[in-house]
Image (cartoon, rainbow, N blue to C red):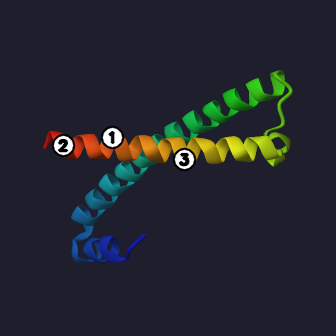
């Protein structure tokens, strides 16, 4: 947190400083609620993915260590790069 809000609060008189601090606390509480909601959503998504991986008995680490998966990922990167270049070229033509 920066020191600027504290300097602003120091310049205010007692009543306005209290109002400022109450507003700031309300802002921080609102921000906390948003962060908690985001974190809860992220945890729920991770739990959902983990559930299905466990249910299907998939170990992603072991799977990604295999040679064919590395080759597959490399191939997909090449296809994706070609697709992006074609799309970029098409956009330039349409301009």
Image quarter in which the N terminus is found: bottom left
Picture disc at residue 87: 1
Query: Residue 20: x and y, percent?
Result: 27, 60
Compare marks 3 and 1 and give the one earlier in the sequence: 3
* Residue 61 image position (x, y, % from top left): 81, 45
- Depicted 14 relative to depicted 49: above or below: below
| N-terminal label among 2 and 1 | 1
- Residues marked 2 and 1 touching at CB (< 8 Å): no
Please tell me how crowded label 1 is: few (under 14), some (14-19), or many (20+) other residues with Cα within 10 Å. Answer: few
Q: Residues within 10 Å of mark 3 (few under 14, many from 20)?
A: few
Give the alpha-carbon distance from disc 2 to disc 1, as whole Å. 10 Å
Q: Nearer the viewer, residue 55 or 7?
A: 55
Which residue sits at x=52%, y=41%? 79
**Quadrant in which residue 82 is drawn:** top left
Outermost residue, top side: 55
Q: Which residue does the image show at 30% across and 46% down from the upper left? A: 88
Residue corresponding to mark 2: 93
Helix, strand or loop at label 1? It is helix
Residue carrying label 3: 78
Compute the Cα span from label 3 to label 1: 14 Å
């Amino acid at each position: 947190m920066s020191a600027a809000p504290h300097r602003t609060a120091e310049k205010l008189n007692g009543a306005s400083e209290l109002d400022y601090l109450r507003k700031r606390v309300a802002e921080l509480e609102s921000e906390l609620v948003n962060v908690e909601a985001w974190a809860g959503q992220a945890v729920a998504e991770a739990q959902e993915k983990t559930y299905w991986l466990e249910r299907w008995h998939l170990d992603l680490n072991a799977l990604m260590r295999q040679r064919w998966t590395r080759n597959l990922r490399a191939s997909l990167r090449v296809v994706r790069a070609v697709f992006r270049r074609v799309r970029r070229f098409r956009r330039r033509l349409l301009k």
